[in-house]
Image (cartoon, helix red, strand yellow):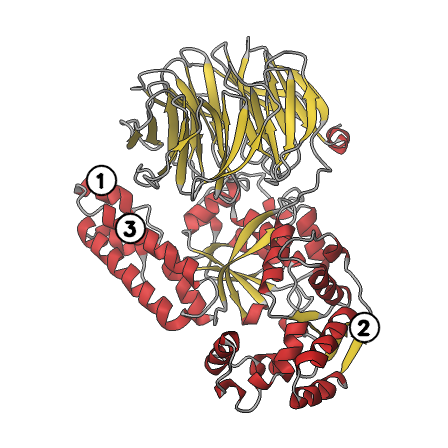
Amino acid sequence: MFIESSDSAEDPKQIWKNKIHQIESLLLEADIFFHDVEGIGKYKKKLRTEMKFLTALKNLPINELKKYLDTSNITHLRDLLDVAKKRSCCAFYKSFAVLQRKSKREIDLIVDDGATWVKVVSRNVRGLAMDFIGASGSSNRSVIEQTQDYIEMAQIHLHFFKMPKIIFEFMHGVPDLLQYKLESFGIEVVGDMVDINEFVKLPVDFAPYYNDDICDNTVSSFLEQKCLKEEECVMDTVNLDISTVFALISSLTHGNGANYNYDSQLLNAQAALERTKPVLPPILKAIKDTKLIICRTAYDAVQSILSTVAGPEEIVRAKELFEKVEVVEDKLSEQAAKLKLTDKISQRSKIIFGSGDYYKAVTITANRHFVYAAAHQEMVDLSDANLPRTLLRTINCKQNAVRAVRFNVDGNYCISCGADKSVKLWNPYKGTLLKTYTGTGWEVLDAQGSSDNSMILVGGMDKQLTVFDVESGKIIRRWRGHNGQVNSVAFNEESTVAVSGCQDGVVRCFDIRDRNAPIQQMDEAKDAILTVDVNSHEIASGSADGSARTYSIRDGKMTDDKFIYFLGESVTSLHFSADGQCFLASTKDGFIRLIDKMNGQLLADYTGHVNTEYRVESCLLATDAHVVSGSEDAHLYIWNLIEMKILHKLPHPNSVVHSVSSHPKKPILLSSSTTNIFLWGLQKEEEDST
C-alpha cells in the first residue's frame, strides 16, 4: 500500500511522477477487479479529475508544486480500492437519503451483497484527534457526524427489511476515545487504536464519551435497536412483479431460447443480453427457500398478458409457478402512499411496489425507472409543513446597522457584522451576546466562522481581510492588497483557505497559515464581486457585471470556460445547493434563479419580492426544498423550490430585509434589518429554548 508520508523526503518532481503512475495503476486495477460494479464510473471519474489536476501542475516551479501536491486525494482513493478488493465490494459511492436533511449522502463502499456498509477513513490520527476534541460541527462533517448520517440512512434503507451493518475502517490509525464513541453507537471499527493523549492534550473536564449532547435522538434510537447481526439479515418473503414473473416463465430464458433468431429487433437484443448475462440464475438464487407473493394487480396483469401472447410451454410454467405463489390483496405502505405519480411512477407500479413494502417483502424487479424515481422523491422533502415562520426572538445588536448575519457551522451561534466596525458573536436562541470583536478599520460587510469554530473571517470597507481568534478576540491574520472594499468572504471546507470577493472585481484566496500575498487571484469579472460561496471543490462568485462564475478551488481556473452564467443584472447573492449540482442566484432585477451548474440551464425562477436597489441575499433551507430571500418591502419571503410558489411573507418592522442565513440542519432562519437580527423557527423551538 502506498504511504503518503514517504513522499516528504523526495523531490517534488519525483513525487509528481509517482502520483501520475499511481493514478494509472489505480485505473487499471479498477478495470480489472470492478469493471462491471455499480459506481465504478464515479470512482474512475475521481481518478481522472485527479489526473487532470496533476497534469496542470507539470510546469510549475518546485516550491509551488510541493504546495499543490499536498492537496492530493490519491491516498484516500488508494485506500478505498484496497478495502474494496479485500471486502468484495458490490457498489462504490452509492447515494442514499438522510432523513433529517432530506439530502443525498454517499456510502463509500457497499459489500456483502448490500448487507454491510463501509466508510473508509484516510485521515491521519492527529487530525482525527484534533477533530474529535475540537469540532463535531465541521462543515465537511466530522467522523461523528458522518456516523450519524450512516445511522440515519441505515435506519431508512433496510437490506431485506433489516438494518445494514456499518463498518468504519481507519487506514492510518484511530484515536482510542473516538473508537470507543463509535462502538457505543454500534459501529464496527477496524484499524490500529492509538492513545489520543499521544497527539492532543485533553482539557481536565473533557468527557465527550459520556456527553449526551453528542448522542442525539437519531443515535439514541439507533442504540435502542443496535446493529443487527449479519446472520439475522435473512430474506424470507419475496414479492414478484410482472417483469420477474415473465423472466421466470419466458421461453427466452429457458432451454435454447436465447439462441433463437426472433423477428423482433427488441427480442433479439434481449436474447443477446441473455446469452451474455442470464437473468434466471440470480432470480432463482434470490427466491430459493422463500415465501413468494404477488399482489392482485400484478397477478391480473400477468394473466391478461398470458391470455394474449403466451406460448403453450410458457402457460405451463406459469401454472406451475403460481402453485407456489400466494396472491395477496393490493395494499400500500405509508411510505409508498406518499409517492407522487410521474411519468416514471405509474399507479400500477406504485401498487405493486407498495404492496411489497406493506407485506415486508422484497420486490424483485427489472423496473429500474420506478426504483430511481421513487428514491429521488424520498431524497427531497417537498412538504410545505414545518417551515420557520414564527418569530422567536428579536435582538437589537447595537452596531448602528447590521450589515450581515451568519449562522456558525453547526447552527448553535451566529455572527453579526456592524457598521460600527465591530463583529459580535451571539447565542440567538437566548439573545445572549457572547463576545465582541474589534480592530477593523471601517464597516464590516461580511463574516464567516471556521469549520472548527476557532476563527472568524471578516471583510469590509477597510479593504482588508481579517481573521479573529474566537476565544481570545485577537486578530491573528490580516491581509491587505485589496483595491476596494471586501464585499463577501468565505472559508473552504477545512478552513485552510480564506476567500474574498472585492469591489475591484477580483476573487482572492489566501493560505490561512501565512501572511503572504494571495495564493490565487481570479480577475475575470468586469465589475465588483458582490458575493462568493465555496463548496468542497469549487468557488462561485457573483458580480455587478451581471455574471456568475465558478472556479476550481485547487488551481483557481474556471471550471468550464463555456459557462459564464450571464444573469443580466448585478448578482447580489449566490449559494451552491447541498449536492453542488446547482446554485441559487439573486439579481438586482427582482429575480432569484436556480441554475444547473453543469449546463447553465435555468431550472426555476422565483419572483414576488422586491430587489432593485440594495444587496439583498437569498438562500436555500437545510432541506434544499425551499428558497428564502430578503426584500425591500419589509418582508422575508419563502418559496416552494419545485412549484416556485410563495408560501409565506414574514413581516419586519423596517423596509429593507437584506441579509438572511439558514440553519445548517434545522428549520430555523436568521434575518437582519437596520440594527436588529430576527430569529425565525417553529413554535416548539421557542418552547425548547426557554
- Which mark, residue 52? 3
The kind of secondary structure element at disc 3 is helix
Q: How many marks?
A: 3
- Report which quarter residue 309 is drawn in: bottom right
Mark 3 Cα within 10 Å, few/some/many (few <14, many 20+)?
Answer: few
- Report which quarter residue 228 is drawn in: bottom right
- Image point 31% across, 61% down: which residue? 2
Q: Mark 1: which amino acid?
A: Glu
Mark 1–mark 3 distance (CA, rounded to whole Å)? 17 Å
**Residue 160 placement (x, y as % from top left):** 67, 69
Q: Is residue 414 above or below residue 442?
A: below
Mark 2–mark 1 distance (CA, rounded to whole Å)? 68 Å
**Residue 567 placement (x, y as % from top left):** 44, 28
The kind of secondary structure element at disc 2 is strand
Q: Mark 3: which amino acid?
A: Lys
The kind of secondary structure element at disc 1 is helix
Q: Is residue 359 above or below residue 18?
A: below
Mark 2 vs 1: CB contact within 8 A: no
Q: Nearer the viewer, mark 2 or mark 3?
A: 2
**Residue at image mark 1:** 64
Comparing 568 with 64, the one in front is 568
**Residue at image mark 2:** 328
Mark 1 vs 3: CB contact within 8 A: no
